[in-house]
Image: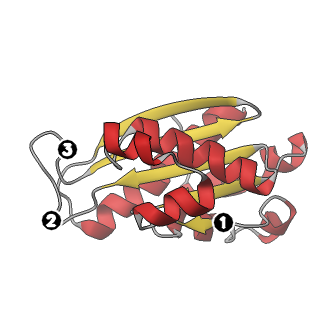
Amino acid sequence: MYKDIEYKDIEYKVVELLIEKGFHITFAESCTAGLAAARLVNVPDASKVLDVSFVTYANEAKVKYVGVNEETISQHGVVSEAVAGEMSRGAADAMGAEVGVGISGIAGPTGGTAEKPVGMVCFGIYINGETKTFTQQFGNLGRNNVRERSVAFVYEKLLELLS
């Protein structure tokens, strides 16, 4: 995808694209616990595109702050594309942002099942009325490696979808 671009360059390019388009972004993060938003604010002009971000670690927080439907969690489980998609839309709607990112996964070392193993992360990316969802299996690489790879995936997808 954008493997030849250094990670820092991706952050800068995403901020640049958001500014060019006049978009604001917000994140609803579970397993990454704010890491994706933190990467964005590494860029000096991030304040032009980010007003608020959410760490919705608990299911109740996902429902209360970013509007995830409790029924969606019951039907699909919290680690699902359905929930990640609702997180992305709900965060964007809550803040009036054109771009929302939802991240929910199992970073480990525990919590995985045969159906949803450690290292499985689901993503929702909402851009101007359209939501795309993705699932990545990073494997049981260790908690922080799963989180880091999740954030790298988000920025690669944002760059691709905003370009």
Q: Are marks 2 and 1 in contact (CB under 8 Å)?
A: no
Q: Residue furthest left?
A: 114
Q: Determine crowd level at label 1: few under 14, some 14-19, many 20+ residues with C-alpha closer than 10 A.
A: many
Q: Looking at the image, is mark 2 or mark 3 earlier in the sequence?
A: 2
Q: Looking at the image, is mark 2 or mark 1 earlier in the sequence?
A: 1
Q: Amino acid at mark 1?
A: Ser
Q: Is residue 30 left or right of residue 121?
A: right
121 shown above or below 106: above
Q: Is residue 155 left or right of residue 117?
A: right
Percent x, y of residue 123: 46, 43
**Residue 53, label in figure:** 1
Q: Amino acid at mark 3?
A: Lys
Percent x, y of residue 53: 66, 65
Percent x, y of residue 163: 72, 32
In this rendered view, identify the residue nearer to me: 71 or 78: 71
**Where on the picture, by quarter, is residue 32?**
bottom left
Q: Which residue is mark 2?
A: 110
Q: Which residue is mark 3?
A: 116
Q: Are marks 1 and 3 in contact (CB under 8 Å)?
A: no
